Amino acid sequence: MPRNEFALMNYRYVILALGCLVFAAVSAAADPSNVVFLIADDISQEDLGCYGHPSVQTPNIDALAARGLRFDNAYLTTSSCSPSRCSIITGRYPHNTGAPELHTELPAGSVLFPELLKNAGYYTVLSGKHHMGNHANVAFTKISKGKGPGKEEDWVEILRDRPKDKPFFCWFASTDAHRAWSINEDAPKYDPADVKVPPYLVDGPKTREDLASYYHEVSRYDHFVGEVVAELKRQDVFDNTLIIVMADNGRPFPRCKTRLYDSGIKTPFVVHDPRRSEPAVVEGLISSIDVAATILEFTGVEKDPRIQGVSFVKILKDPKASIRDMVFAEHNWHVYRNHERSVRFGDWLYIRNNFPDQQNLCVEAYIGGAGEELWAAHKSGQLTDAQSNVFQNPCPAEELYHVGRDPDQLNNLASNPEQEQVLNQARALLTRWTDQTGDTIPTNPTPHRDAAPGGSKPDRKAFKHLEMPGDASKATEINEPGPISMP
């Protein structure tokens, strides 16, 4: 073959190959492959406008819910900051992560779903609250401490500066709405007269001021969610980006944060799926450990077998679909020694307390205006039954609530003989999960770190993490144990 014809043929092959590469790149760019995961600090589900709150203004999250999916039964595995985040990033229950207690860090070699994305070619970034330990850093291409009072002020900057030749995953972690409060111009300032006081708090001026400041930080988180959405639209990538909006635990108030009631473990959960054109409300149960499996399936990255959660991509496609019959949660050491476990199934919530011979406390049970008024009312003997929960000593060893009829979980039915069948069913479900996931009750647990108001000061020399619950090697759980017969 003449040299010029050979050169021409090679040239044509090069042009064809380049054309294929361009087509593949364009096709990849058109796929909904990017993910933005926004996680707030200390916000209960009921405190967003899209979940029916009459006062809190969250127009940006509400807009995502109005166009996308609002999950009404999304549950956390724990209502404690660092254990919750460690559970989400690994897709594992806290007692299986190696970091089940507050301020414990993930061990080296943990499965981290953003690391799997990074290894698959994603640009991965974390900005804001970290709280998972240095061994989680390997999952991220870039880590920022965040900017501003809520650590959200560099989120847009990060999106602007990202490499444009890679799909991206952003873990944007606000410190709103964590105490202590900080007020600025990024969100509305609320009138204490307009707040909604839960029945388990004292309806007094300090509590109302406390809640008004909390509302401000909830709205500030929403403001920056809106800034992120606007930037994604400006870059013309909103329509190929999955967005998840949630929180790590419930509001930082008495009987909320750390506790296994809906005020503590029921998280707001709003999803923008760019493949969907119709909005929907999802009634099916999901757990925060399902986030990892879902994002991996959505992006086409293989799931690590150590991940215990199940993907809810099926729900993104069909909001009436179901992926689990039950969700489980736990309460371990969080400044105070604790060991509680819960299962939510059907209309029922069952809680088992393995350390009932003490008050069920966290720091948020007595700090701030709400805590001050609650403890003052206790001292003067003016508490209602609903407000006496954090002062019970001993606490109930078992609690059973019909969440449909009792949304605040105030009427414990565990001793009601009419509910014996459902109580036995709940016990069996929790016991089976305990066995399958290698859960344990420490015989030498981490002691209290702080003294409650009026209490004796703990021995600081004794304070260290002595024996944490659970077996980190376990990776099995109950997803579909068979039909649940409801009484």
Image: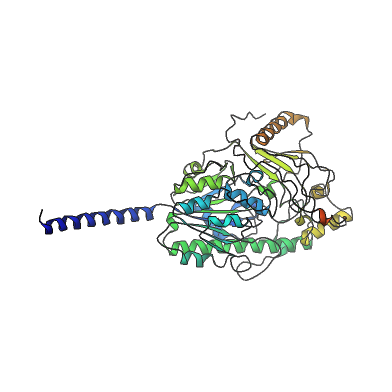
Q: Which residue occupies the foreground of this view, 410 or 473?
A: 473
* Viewer-closest of 77 and 70: 77
In this orientation, does residue 156 appear? yes
Structure colour scheme: rainbow
**Farthest right residue in view:** 380
Is 355 displayed left or right of 245 in the figure?
right
Q: Is residue 29 left or right of residue 146?
A: left
Residue 483 placement (x, y as % from top left):
59, 29
- Residue closest to the eye, 144 or 245: 144
Q: Nearer the viewer, residue 374 or 94?
A: 94
Residue 480, percent across and down? 57, 33
Residue at 77%, 56% (x, y): give it.
363
Figure quadrant of the C terminus: top right
Q: Is residue 37 visible?
A: no
Write the residue at 75% across / 42% down: 442
- Image spot of residue 85 (x, y percent): 62, 52
User: Please, is residue 364 above or below residue 426 in the view?
Assistant: below
Q: x and y percent of residue 38 in the render?
A: 56, 57
Q: How many marks?
A: 0
Q: Identify whether 9 is placed above or below 184.
A: above
The residue at the far left in this view is 2
At x 78%, y 41%, the residue is 443
